[in-house]
């Protein structure tokens, strides 16, 4: 069924302000519009397609403008050449795609394609050119990603994507089970789009997922990680993770290749025990899973903060942690246990060590931060000093950054218990105080404020002397200023000389 909208007056305006046809043309990016016009003049069909059309109809700003055309790559190259545009053929890895540069911006212009899937869990076995737009959009994953727009603003919508868009519904193009089995990465893309678009999964999509789970084992860790990372920073990440965990997708394993050997990498099975996990009512409005999701969405949408929020309570409810004390549910030690589990997850996901260390530190210390923020007698300075001495962070700037992230986590944790934004004020103030303290606390001798007179004054004792000065600054016994450090260095040398003479 070819479904082409030439009029759009019937569109429901209550959900999205879908632009009428005339307005759509104006909203297509200028470079893309020039490409569509040039192809039209040369007798070729060309459309903007996929994510950019979806975003435009939703009133969002598209990331990039993909173009699909009846022209073969060599024809695209020739048309671009005649326009004086630079064009590069994507070659084997990017079958049928030519990058065309217009007004300094890159556009991917891809010939209509069809794809046949086989053994591989993600990549098609065969790709060939096709002659119709309809065939090209049929291979795309979701109905809202399968719409195309021509240079006159006419929308080509063969799978009712517009209706799904208006209902905020994610639905596969064609049979969900088949589409997920073809390319199992679409399972993760589905979760990501729920978070990105604030959509609900259509029941047909959910029902079609399970049969493709065996295919997840053939996906590479890199691809899964990329999708999950994209999802975790979206504004409605809870939607995507709820689908991932409740359907059991999170319990599947993908794979990583190391020294030629594949190993299974479980995705996120550690999270499913939180679903329905009861929590003590006075402190918590939600069960463990909804609390986690609420904290996730309340945290700042950057990777470190989001991963820390996502994993902050993962230790709750674990054997040896969950207890009933005086008739109340408790999870003492869930921070330490959670930190251990977070390290396990992030290490197996092959994240860079500094990233893992930071998330683990946040999970491990989130209860301590709450305690310090809530109890006036708790000595924040003592905490900072002990961390500086123990070299938990490589610089005071690093330590300060960690406290900014911790404040975000602490506040998100409060919101995730069903409290108000105003309830986070105390935590925010304490966080700012800790950040300031951290910035003024040297972590290494490089952060001592001294000139060359200090090492000169220490003479043969320079290494141990500098460590001594650092420790005394960290303990609050010396000021971190050139004059004070110089004097202390002179005294240190004198004392050591004396000691030497007396032994
Ligand atoms: P984003 O806003 O994240 O860029 P997008 O929809 O543009 O979202 P891309 O991954 O850039 O997503 O892909 C561009 C288009 O290509 C999609 O809209 C979809 O039509 C199609 N597509 C991409 N990946 C797949 C896939 N794995 N299976 C089917 N179609 C896909
Ligand atoms: Mg895109």
Image: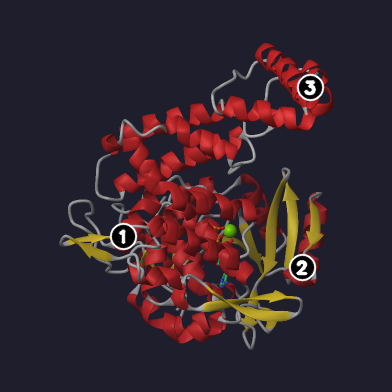
Q: Which quarter of the rendering shows the N terminus?
A: bottom left
Question: Going from the N terminus, do you reach mark 1 or mark 3 first?
Answer: 1
Q: Which residue is mark 1?
A: 331
Q: Secondary structure at mark 3?
A: helix
Q: Upstream in the sequence, badge 2 or badge 1? A: 2
Which residue occupies the extreme front position in the image? 503
Q: SS for tag 1?
A: loop
Residue at the (30%, 46%) spot, across then down: 415
Spatial separation of the CA atoms under disc 1 and disc 3 = 55 Å
Q: Which residue is mark 3?
A: 497
The residue that disc 2 covers is 73
Q: Earlier in the sequence, mark 3 or mark 2?
A: 2
Residue ID at (23%, 54%): 284
Judging depth in this view, the residue of 334 and 2 nearest the camera is 334
**Residue 278 lies in quadrant:** bottom left
Q: Does the residue at mark 1 contact the one at mark 3 (Cβ under 8 Å)? A: no
Q: Label 2 neighbourhood size at 10 Å, few (<14), some (14-19), many (20+)? A: many
Image quadrant in which you'd find residue 67: bottom right
Report if the beta carbon of the residue with label 1 is closer than 8 angstroms to ligand 1.
no
Residue positioned most to the left: 327
Cα–Cα span, label 2 and label 1 = 61 Å
């Amino acid at each position: 069924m070819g479904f082409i909208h030439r009029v759009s007056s019937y569109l429901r305006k209550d959900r999205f302000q879908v632009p009428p046809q005339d307005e759509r043309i104006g909203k297509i990016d200028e470079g893309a519009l020039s490409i569509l016009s040039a192809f039209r003049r040369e007798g070729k069909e060309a459309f903007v397609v996929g994510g950019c059309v979806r975003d435009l109809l939703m009133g969002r700003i598209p990331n990039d403008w993909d173009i699909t055309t009846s022209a073969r790559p060599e024809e695209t190259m020739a048309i671009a050449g005649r326009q004086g545009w630079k064009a590069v053929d994507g070659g084997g890895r990017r079958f049928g795609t030519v990058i065309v540069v217009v007004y300094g911006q890159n556009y991917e212009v891809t010939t209509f394609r069809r794809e046949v899937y086989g053994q591989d869990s993600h990549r098609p076995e065969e790709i060939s050119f096709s002659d119709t737009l309809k065939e090209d959009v049929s291979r795309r994953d979701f109905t809202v990603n399968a719409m195309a727009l021509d240079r006159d603003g006419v929308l080509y919508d063969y799978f009712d994507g517009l209706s799904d868009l208006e209902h905020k519904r994610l639905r596969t193009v064609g049979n969900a089970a088949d589409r997920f089995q073809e390319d199992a990465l679409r399972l993760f893309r589905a979760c990501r789009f729920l978070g990105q678009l604030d959509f609900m999964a259509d029941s047909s999509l959910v029902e079609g997922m399970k049969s493709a789970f065996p295919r997840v084992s053939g996906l590479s860790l890199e691809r899964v990680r990329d999708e999950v990372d994209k999802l975790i920073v979206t504004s409605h990440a809870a939607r995507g993770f709820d689908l991932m965990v409740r359907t059991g997708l999170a319990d599947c394993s993908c794979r990583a290749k190391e020294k030629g050997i594949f190993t299974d990498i479980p995705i996120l099975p550690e999270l499913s025990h939180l679903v329905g996990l009861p929590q003590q009512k006075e402190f918590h409005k939600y069960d463990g899973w909804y609390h986690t999701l609420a904290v996730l969405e309340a945290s700042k949408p950057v990777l470190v903060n989001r991963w820390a929020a996502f994993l902050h309570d993962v230790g709750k409810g674990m054997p040896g942690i969950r207890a009933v004390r005086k008739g109340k549910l408790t999870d003492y030690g869930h921070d330490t246990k959670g930190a251990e589990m977070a390290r396990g997850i992030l290490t197996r996901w092959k994240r860079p060590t500094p990233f893992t260390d930071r998330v683990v530190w946040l999970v491990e210390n989130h209860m301590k931060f709450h305690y310090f923020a809530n109890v006036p007698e708790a000595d924040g300075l003592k905490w900072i000093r002990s961390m500086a001495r123990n070299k938990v962070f490589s610089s005071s700037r690093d330590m300060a950054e960690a406290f900014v992230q911790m404040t975000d986590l602490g506040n998100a944790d409060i919101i995730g218990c069903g409290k108000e934004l105003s309830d986070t004020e105390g935590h925010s103030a304490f966080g700012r105080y800790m950040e300031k303290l951290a910035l003024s606390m040297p972590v290494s001798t490089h952060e001592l404020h001294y000139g060359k007179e200090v090492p000169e004054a220490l003479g043969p004792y320079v290494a141990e002397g500098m460590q001594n000065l650092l420790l005394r600054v960290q303990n609050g016994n010396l000021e971190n200023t050139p004059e004070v450090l110089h004097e202390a260095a002179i005294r240190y040398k004198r004392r050591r000389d004396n000691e030497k003479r007396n032994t």
